[in-house]
């Protein structure tokens, strides 16, 4: 199988698995214990904290380990809500559902900031939206299109109004340079399984001095900021993944990732007519390719590609058994036909150039087959999703 769905999840790196195994096998001691085995678990967790902090340009005490991106995001919004003044939460219209659903449920309500047709935040609307808002949550990069958001400007403008900023960096971490202090962030969420780490573990950066209210309360672990016995193996895995990302950033692995994605896209665009690249080309994650194929239903393409051994995602959402434009596509003004014919291909540094080329060939074949079956003037083949 060629895995081109890294924005959904990534394989564990062998080094990450190796580092985790002893903690899964023998390192079961509760890190809060007072005996040797417990202290060793605590040390491993603190080492991981230092690694994640270094990667983010933060201090170790500013890192809180969580169960993943969703919990980090929910905790950040919960805490911001508890300490902010009146007014709605200001969030972009293209946030992940972890942000949107949580913010919608807040009694204070939310104000959505639109994006342009390239999927980037409308900064004029954002500036207007800041009036009377309580706090801000804008993602660093979008999970569907890979479009990178103007976070530096968002932070600067929010700070001028005295508003706190959280960013959902689950997709951006490891793909673009992101340093919390340089950006002026108050809170940042990340998740290990998008970065060749394990599932079920993530981190929340909490700027030192920021008033904070935990979401999970109980035994007071993580300095009282996230109760629950620590997932030692998962945290160790995240630490190793972060350390590898740090090294890769130093040798510009982001460029290698871009090279793979661009080669895949270039081959497809060269050899196939009726392909549209969605999202602002000047501001995309180096790994993401969101493409629409004229006259092809994404659900049909997914079936053909699965048979050919390619794993990727529909660019639209499956609702009531039918592909529908996702909220991201709606926000970008992508019409229904184009949305329903879109696929997301997302690469990781574990993909090879051979895979990129082979995948482009398979995608071309699948598109041509579907177009042949459909014939001219019939309209897109309807393939209902399950
Ligand atoms: C942008 C974004 N935020 C949050 C999440 C949720 O992360 P997790 O799966 O670790 O809960 C995801 C996962 O797809 C995501 O893409």
Image (tube, rainbow, N blue to C red):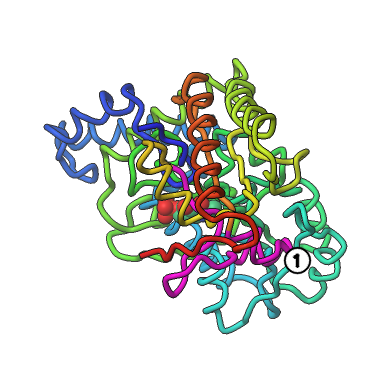
Identify the residue at the far bottom of this view.
107
Quarter holding the N terminus?
A: top left
Residue 248 lies in the magenta-colored region:
no
* Left/right of residue 152 with respect to residue 63 in the rendered view: right
Count of numbered badges drawn on the protein: 1
Q: Residue 105, image x and y in percent?
A: 52, 79
Q: Nearer the viewer, residue 222 or 266?
A: 266
Residue 177 can be seen, yes or no: no
Q: Which range is magenta?
A: 312-340
Comparing 129 with 119, the one in front is 119
Is residue 62 shown above or below 83? Answer: above
x 69%, y 40%: residue: 273
Quadrant of residue 31 within the rendered picture: top left
339 in the magenta segment: yes
Q: Residues within 10 Å of mark 1 (few under 14, many from 20)?
A: many
Name the residue: 59% across, 39% down.
288
Q: Nearer the viewer, residue 144 or 58?
A: 144
Residue at image position (16%, 34%) is 27
* Residue holding disc 1: 114
Whether residue 185 can be seen here: yes
Q: Residue furthest top?
A: 251
- Name the secondary structure under disc 1: loop
- Residue at 60 percent of width and 18 percent of height: 250
Percent position of residue 4, x then y: 47, 37
Q: Would residue 83 be found to the left or right of residue 117 on screen?
A: left
- Say which quarter of the image contains residue 13: top left
231 relative to 86, above or below: above
For the C terminus, the image quarter is: bottom left
Q: Is residue 26 left or right of residue 125?
A: left
Residue 65: % across, % down: 40, 47
The x and y percentages for residue 67 are: 36, 52
Depth check, front residue: 377 or 299? 377
């Amino acid at each position: 199988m060629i895995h081109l769905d890294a924005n959904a999840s990534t394989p564990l790196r062998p080094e990450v698995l190796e580092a985790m195994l002893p903690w899964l096998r023998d390192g079961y001691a509760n890190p809060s214990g007072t005996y040797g085995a417990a202290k060793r678990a605590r040390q491993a967790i603190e080492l991981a904290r230092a690694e994640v902090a270094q990667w983010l340009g933060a201090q170790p005490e500013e890192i809180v380990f969580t169960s993943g991106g969703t919990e980090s995001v929910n905790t950040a919004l919960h805490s911001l809500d508890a300490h902010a003044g009146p007014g709605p939460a200001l969030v972009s219209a293209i946030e992940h559902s972890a942000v949107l659903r949580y913010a919608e449920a807040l009694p204070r309500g939310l104000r959505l900031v639109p994006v342009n047709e390239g999927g980037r935040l409308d900064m004029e609307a954002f500036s207007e939206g800041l009036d009377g808002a309580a706090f801000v949550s804008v993602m660093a990069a979008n999970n569907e299109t890979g479009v990178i958001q103007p976070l530096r400007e968002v932070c600067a403008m929010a700070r001028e109004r005295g508003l706190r900023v959280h960013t959902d960096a689950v997709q951006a971490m490891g793909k673009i340079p992101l340093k919390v202090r340089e950006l002026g962030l108050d809170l940042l969420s990340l998740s290990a399984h998008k970065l060749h780490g394990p599932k079920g573990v993530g981190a929340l950066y909490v700027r030192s001095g920021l008033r904070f209210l935990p979401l999970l309360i109980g035994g007071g672990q993580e300095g009282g900021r996230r109760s629950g016995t620590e997932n030692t193996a998962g945290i160790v895995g995240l630490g190793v993944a972060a350390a590898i990302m740090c090294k890769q950033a130093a040798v510009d692995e982001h460029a290698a990732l871009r090279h793979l994605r661009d080669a895949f896209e270039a081959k497809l665009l060269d050899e196939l007519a009726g392909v549209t690249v969605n999202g602002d080309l000047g501001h995309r994650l180096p790994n993401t390719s969101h493409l629409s194929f004229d006259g092809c239903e994404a659900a049909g393409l997914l079936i053909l590609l699965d048979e050919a051994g390619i794993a990727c995602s529909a660019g639209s959402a499956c609702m009531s058994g039918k592909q529908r434009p996702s909220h991201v596509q709606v926000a970008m003004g992508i019409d229904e036909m184009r949305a329903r014919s879109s696929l997301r291909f997302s690469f990781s540094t574990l993909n090879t150039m051979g895979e990129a080329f082979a995948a482009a060939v398979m995608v071309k074949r699948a598109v041509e087959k579907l177009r042949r079956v459909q014939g001219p003037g019939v309209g897109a083949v309807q393939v209902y999703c399950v």
